[in-house]
Image (cartoon, rainbow, N blue to C red):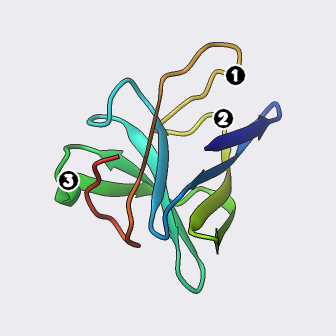
Amino acid sequence: QVKWSYSDTEMAFAISADTSGWVGFGFGRRMVGSYAVIGWCTTTANAGEYKLNDEDVNQVNLVGTSLRRVSCEESGGRTTIRYVRALSTSSVTIDVNSPSRVIFAWHGTDGLAGHRE
């Protein structure tokens, strides 16, 4: 599930899935070549923006930590990551007045790992 709100300069997201592992959300037509925010909960929220260069997890590279107000919650087998980002960054510009293609995925473990969902 993805929820969002926006202002003139930034966008707030809440991404969640039925998992105790990581959740990821990004903009793009397909996974490879897109940028995505991937996050998970440990004792703190762990989230960053990654460039998805390949389906191989070793080619998923952290490109930014410009996310603000990052938080996480694990409850009842569901992980939710919340964050705020600028509408325009060096990697992605979000046009709130036009349709966007998005990607969404999750995995049962914390940390970067391949997925099938």
Residue 35 image-quadrant placement: top left
Q: Earlier in the sequence, mark 2 or mark 3?
A: 3
Q: Position of residue 105 (x, y in %)?
A: 42, 47
Q: Position of residue 103 (x, y in %)?
A: 44, 35
Q: Amino acid at mark 1?
A: Val
Within 10 angstroms of label 3, few (less than 14), some, or many (20 or more) residues?
few
Instruction: Determine whether the residue tagged by mark 3 lies in a helix, strand or loop.
Output: helix
Judge depth for marks 2 and 1 and give the one in front: 1
Judge depth for marks 2 and 3 and give the one in front: 3
Label 2 – label 3 distance at C-alpha: 25 Å
Within 10 angstroms of label 1, few (less than 14), some, or many (20 or more) residues?
few
Instruction: Name, please, the residue furthest toward the bottom.
Output: 43
Rendered residue at 50%/34% (across/down)? 92
Residue 87 is labelled as 2
Residue that mark 1 sits on: 96
Residue 4 image-quadrant placement: top right
Rendered residue at 83%/34% (across/down)? 7
Residue 54 image-quadrant placement: top left
Rendered residue at 52%/64% (across/down)? 47
Q: Amino acid at mark 3?
A: Gln
Report if the CB atoms under discs 2 and 1 are less than 8 Å apart. Answer: yes
Q: Position of residue 114 (x, y in %)?
A: 25, 57
Instruction: Determine whether the residue tagged by mark 1 lies in a helix, strand or loop.
Output: loop
Nearest the viewer among 10 and 2 is 2
Residue that mark 3 sits on: 59
Instruction: Name, please, the residue furthest toward the front.
Output: 76
Q: Quadrant of the N terminus?
A: top right
Q: Earlier in the sequence, mark 1 or mark 3?
A: 3
